[in-house]
Structures are given as structure tokens and as C-alpha cells.
Image (tube, rainbow, N blue to C red):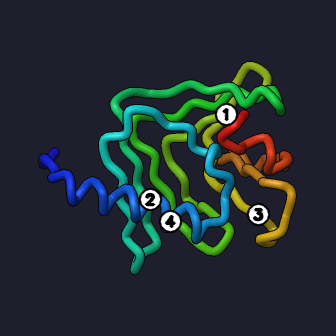
Amino acid sequence: MAQRSFEEMSSVRRSQYNCSKSCVFPQGALPMEDMEEFGYNREAGFVWLIQKKKKDHVFKQIKRAVSYAPEVTAFVEQYKLKKMTGVKTKELLLWLSVVEVYLDKPTSEKLTFKTGTGLSDSFPASAFELNE
């Protein structure tokens, strides 16, 4: 991986903020740590996040375990992340890949997660705020 200058990293952080702002998702929905790289290709709508190691997280308010791989990718659309890779959720005893996350509309109070098996579940968007 190429080294980045401080100015480039600042630009990446601004892009990350702009992306999350345009996606309208709660800022805590992707609680990744030790970020090494963030990229957002506006033309393709492709976003990638790279962290040093896998991160397991439990969203306490909804009692859900989620695992974030060292590399998480998705295609960004308005109010939606599609074709996601690198995110799994635990359902009973199985880890299922999350392939889509979306809000029905910008004012929606519910965030919906869809797995590769076609199962989906909606949760209060407030469960994914940073102050959890």
C-alpha cells in the first residue's frame, strides 16, 4: 500500500465525511477502528474502507453482533449501500453476510439490513448512533 501524505489523508477524511453525509446513515453504523484507508469513487459510487484488523462489535440497544472484515466495500446510492462485502451479522448460531443497508426515505426512523440469503430486518436508526 502506498504511503499517503498528511494532506492526502486529510482529503480522505473529508471525503469520508462527505460520503457519510450524502448517504444519510447514522455515523455509528460502521464502527471500524484503526482505519488505514478510505476511498470513494463518485463516478462509480464505489466506497472502500480498510482497517488494520477485523472488528467485532455488539450494538447493545438491539443486541446484535456484527463483524467487520479488514476490508469493507459497497456501492453507494441515495439512502442505500448495495453489494456490500466484509460485513457479517450473527443470526442464531450462523454468521450471515450483509449485502445491503438502506433507509426507505431520508426521514425514516428505521435502518434495514438485508443478508445474502434474502433475509432482512429493520432496526431503529438511533441504535447506530455514535453515542451508543
Disc 4 vs disc 3: which is toward the camera? 4
Q: Is residue 14 something that shows in the picture?
A: yes
The crowding category of the residue bearing disc 1, from other C-alpha atoms within 10 Å (few below 14, some 14 to 19, many at least 20), is many
State the residue at coordinates (54%, 67%).
76
Label 1 to label 4: alpha-carbon separation: 23 Å
- Reading the image, the residue beneath label 2 is 16
Going by the numbered disc 4, the residue's amino acid type is: Cys
- Reading the image, the residue beneath label 4 is 19
Q: Quadrant of residue 80?
A: bottom right
State the residue at coordinates (13%, 48%).
2
Q: Secondary structure at mark 1?
A: strand
Going by the numbered disc 2, the residue's amino acid type is: Gln
Q: Is 19 situated above or below 31? A: below
Label located before the other in sequence (1 or 2): 2
Label located before the other in sequence (1 or 4): 4
Q: Which residue is most to the top?
A: 93
Label 1 to label 2: alpha-carbon separation: 23 Å
Label 1 to label 3: alpha-carbon separation: 18 Å
- Reading the image, the residue beneath label 3 is 103
**Image position, residue 26 (x, y; %):** 68, 53
Q: From the image, which quarter does the N terminus lie in?
A: top left
CB under 8 Å between callouts 4 and 2? yes
Going by the numbered disc 1, the residue's amino acid type is: Thr
Going by the numbered disc 3, the residue's amino acid type is: Leu
Q: Secondary structure at mark 4?
A: helix
- Reading the image, the residue beneath label 1 is 89
Q: From the image, which quarter does the C terminus lie in?
A: top right
Disc 3 vs disc 2: which is toward the camera? 2
Label located before the other in sequence (1 or 3): 1
The crowding category of the residue bearing disc 2, from other C-alpha atoms within 10 Å (few below 14, some 14 to 19, many at least 20), is some
